[in-house]
Amino acid sequence: MASFSLEEFVGSGNLKGSLPKLVDEGWDDVPTLKLMTSEDMDAFGMTLQQKEALELRSYLHDRALLQYADRLELSGKALTEILSMTSGDLVSQFGFKRGHMARFLDKTGPCTESLPKSVSSRTRGSLSSPAPGYTKMRQSMTRSSMRSMSISGGKSLEQSLSDLKLKEGHVFKGIVAAGPAEPRACGCVNPPPAVVDQVSPYSTIKDISVQKLAPEHKVGMERLVKTKTPPMKASELWREKPAVLLCIRRPGCIMCRAEAYQLYLRKPIFDALGVQLFAVLHEHIESEVKDFWPRYWGGAVLYDRSMEFFKAMGGGNLLKDKFIPGFLMNPRAIANYKRAKAMGMEMTLRGEGEIKGGLLVVGSGRTGIAYQFIERNFGDWAPVPEVIEMCSKLQNLFCGQQGEE
């Protein structure tokens, strides 16, 4: 189980009583709370039991195994001690399912994609290894440091942005990015038509009417907005701050959930860059939204009734693919499915699933679309380092404009 609900993350263990204080001091969402360092914990006044609980729950959350957190914490064992137990003991003592044990014992963190080492240079110090016995890249960025960096654009942030480069030999795909069109069924099935190779003009998205189905998740908030919010112009979303819009093919799709989950894990980085995160749906099935938010996505969820965002990415037309040729006969789509399955995501089969999605990075005001990724194959993800790099360029542009005023 994965969840970006802070209440579910904290559970009924040692951290529950500290939840109001955590929220009051700015540790008010799961991705940020997971970035707490030992120094942050000491400043907060955490007990040893609370530190161990946070370490354990962060480890489980990375592996979408939060359903075991209360039982494991109740045992009083530290994470390192639990990791040294045999598979038989994990099953008998904590009720681990056989299929979950491999994910739990995988110390590399299957639910996270590695980011460039530059992310760590935003922190106050070096990356921490919270427990001997496993190595985990954890950024130590507090709310206060994020606010100061996103406002000032100081030297440390500039250094980190200049170092935020993709792996050696990687070729940045440019403004419009998409996975390659590979042969299907040994070349017997043609791939869909080529995707557009030019970024969508701003005029195609500025007047889109959207409706907010769910706000950014906060403690104590209702799972969904009970009173329907009135439609609004999409341009209001990024009027003051840039926005990343993840256009989701189907919220019950295991690959869409995995993409949303791994992107929202980086929320503190986007916060530091002053960028908002939105998920955009083209179909409103209330049960599907409830299953999706805040379990796999803790940010705001929007409804694009007319599918205009999805049309914009297709050059004016919806990008669609059939299940058999687009998935069963497409090795890349099958590989994408296996990647999401390894992350422990669950799935449903409700809703329309042939309309392709993608991701847009939109600059503030009337700047326009800065980056556009198109889901050519079912389950293609926008490369997170590319998205972050484009957002950092937007922030540099904003800081430069502020300096000229």
Image (cartoon, grey):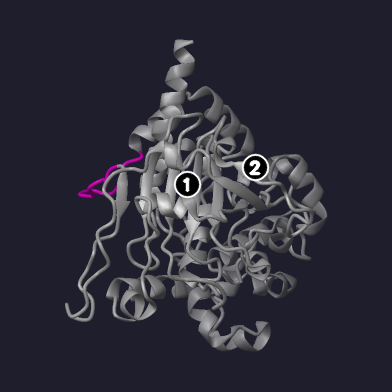
Q: Nearer the viewer, residue 140 or 11?
A: 11
* Residue 247 highlighted magenta (yes or no): no
Q: Is residue 140 visible?
A: no
Q: Is residue 1 visible?
A: yes
Disc 1 element: loop
Badge 1 local density, few (<14 within 10 Å), some, or many (20+)? some
Residue lying farthest to the top in this orientation:
405
Q: Which residues are magenta?
A: 164-174
Under mark 1, the amino acid is Leu
The residue drawn where x is 40% and y is 45% is 387
The residue drawn where x is 65% and y is 42% is 40
Q: Nearer the viewer, residue 359 or 65?
A: 359
Q: Is residue 338 left or right of residue 86?
A: left
Badge 2 local density, few (<14 within 10 Å), some, or many (20+)? some
Mark 2 touching mark 1, by CB under 8 A? no
Q: Residue 239, percent across and down?
A: 56, 31
- Please give the residue where the numbered disc 1 appears in the rendered image: 127
Q: Which mark is residue 40?
A: 2
The residue drawn where x is 67% and y is 70% is 287
Q: CA distance from mark 2 to mark 1?
A: 14 Å
Q: Residue 356, percent across and down?
A: 41, 63
Q: Quadrant of residue 91?
A: bottom right
Q: Magenta stretch: dominant SS?
A: loop
Q: Residue 322, percent across and down?
A: 37, 75
Q: Is residue 28 left or right of residue 36?
A: right
Q: Is residue 180 left or right of residue 240?
A: left
Q: Nearer the viewer, residue 85 or 312?
A: 312
The residue drawn where x is 44% and y is 30% is 367
Under mark 2, the amino acid is Asp
Disc 2 element: helix
